């Protein structure tokens, strides 16, 4: 097995199993159907990494936007009240699933988990109430701030799809590989932040091989992580505000270390020392990366 073949196996290892895909599809379709009846929404759609196909195994959560008309939700209704409205509808929407947890109101969504006997971990939902503005933006609640903020997951999904096509469909698998690395490093970065970081770094460097792309990413990320990042879709939203200066300095060294190892792996590959290259990538990316 050479490095290219190892990365192809790695790509497949990160894909959701057929059981996970089937359960997730059945679950979200049934829940969305029942929620429409409970809350009288005008639109609902999947968002987040599951919708963008950047989710890796195991499947932990599904993000769902439930959109109301502005008259029913946005005018005169506080973010907390909107979230409570969703929370009250969840028992009926999930009544087909007796293992569903008690809904938990979060800052911008309501979460609930459903357990299945043939899937090791529960599948969670993050359900976000929203209303659409006169533009193509959506307004979602921020309970802690007591206000409504702009969001548009559809616009980012379209942007990611175009960029993935430019990369000959290699960007989304590449993002999954980065997420696997993140998972094996304590989930130090949030999923959306990591996606934007990867997309931004690879916007001018076309992916021809995953090994070379990872080399570029780790090297650039060590610099980019120190800079404040704002959502390109809704510019006023800072996506890395959960990281302290200390966190960013620590991540700088983590990315630097990964960059040094990636550079070594690439040198082994160029020297036709395939097994040494594969072992080094396994050391960087973790168990899903094959060694034979």
Image: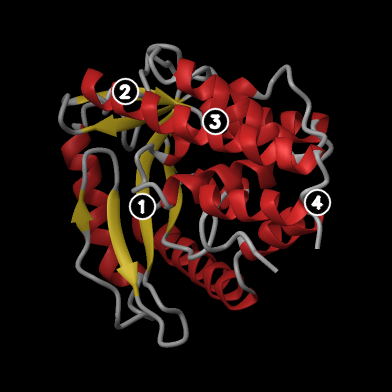
Earlier-in-chain disc, 3 versus 2: 2
Determine the CA span between mark 3 and mark 2: 16 Å
Per the rendering, the mark at residue 8 is none
In the picture, which quadrant includes the N terminus?
A: bottom right
Q: Secondary structure at mark 2?
A: helix
**Circle 3/circle 2 CB separation < 8 Å:** no
Q: Which residue is mark 1?
A: 126
User: Which residue occupies the foreground of this view, 51 or 270?
Assistant: 270
Q: Is residue 44 among what the camera can see?
A: no
Determine the CA span between mark 2 and mark 1: 27 Å
Dot in front, 2 or 1: 2
Earlier-in-chain disc, 4 versus 1: 4
Q: Which residue is mark 3?
A: 259
Q: Residue at x 81, y 40 (%)?
A: 271
Dot in front, 3 or 1: 3
Q: Position of residue 112 (x, y in %)?
A: 29, 62
Q: Which residue is mark 4?
A: 4
In the picture, which quadrant includes the C terminus?
A: bottom right
Q: Is residue 49 among what the camera can see?
A: yes
Dot in front, 4 or 1: 4
User: Which residue occupies the foreground of this view, 38 or 10?
Assistant: 10
Q: Residue at x 42, y 35 (%)?
A: 69
Q: Residue at x 67, y 24 (%)?
A: 202
Earlier-in-chain disc, 4 versus 3: 4
Q: Quadrant of residue 94?
A: bottom left
Q: Which residue is mark 2?
A: 248
């Amino acid at each position: 097995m050479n490095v290219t073949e190892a990365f192809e196996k790695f790509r497949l290892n990160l894909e959701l199993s057929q059981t996970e895909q089937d359960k997730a599809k059945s679950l979200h379709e049934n829940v969305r159907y029942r929620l429409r009846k409970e809350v009288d929404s005008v639109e609902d759609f999947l968002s987040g990494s599951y919708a963008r196909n950047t989710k890796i195994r195991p499947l932990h959560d599904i993000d769902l936007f439930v959109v109301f008309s502005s008259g029913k939700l946005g005018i005169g209704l506080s973010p907390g009240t909107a979230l409570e409205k969703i929370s009250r509808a969840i028992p009926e929407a999930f009544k087909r699933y007796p293992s569903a947890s008690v809904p938990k109101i979060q800052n911008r969504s309501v979460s609930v988990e459903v357990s299945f006997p043939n899937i090791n971990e529960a599948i969670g939902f993050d359900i976000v109430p929203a209303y659409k503005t006169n533009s193509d933006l959506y307004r979602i609640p921020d309970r802690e701030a007591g206000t409504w903020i702009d969001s548009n997951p559809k616009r980012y999904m379209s942007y990611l799809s175009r960029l993935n096509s430019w990369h000959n469909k290699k960007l989304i698998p590449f993002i999954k590989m980065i997420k696997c690395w993140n998972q094996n490093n304590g989930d130090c970065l949030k999923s959306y932040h990591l996606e934007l970081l990867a997309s931004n770094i690879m916007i001018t460097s076309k992916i021809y091989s995953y090994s070379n792309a990872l080399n570029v990413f780790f090297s650039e990320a060590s610099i980019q992580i120190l800079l404040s990042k704002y959502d390109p879709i809704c510019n006023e939203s800072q996506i890395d505000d959960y990281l302290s200066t200390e966190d960013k300095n620590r991540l700088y060294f983590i990315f630097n270390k990964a960059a040094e190892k990636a550079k070594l792996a690439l040198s082994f590959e160029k020297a036709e020392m395939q097994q040494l290259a594969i072992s080094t990538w396994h050391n960087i990316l973790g168990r899903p990366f094959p060694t034979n």
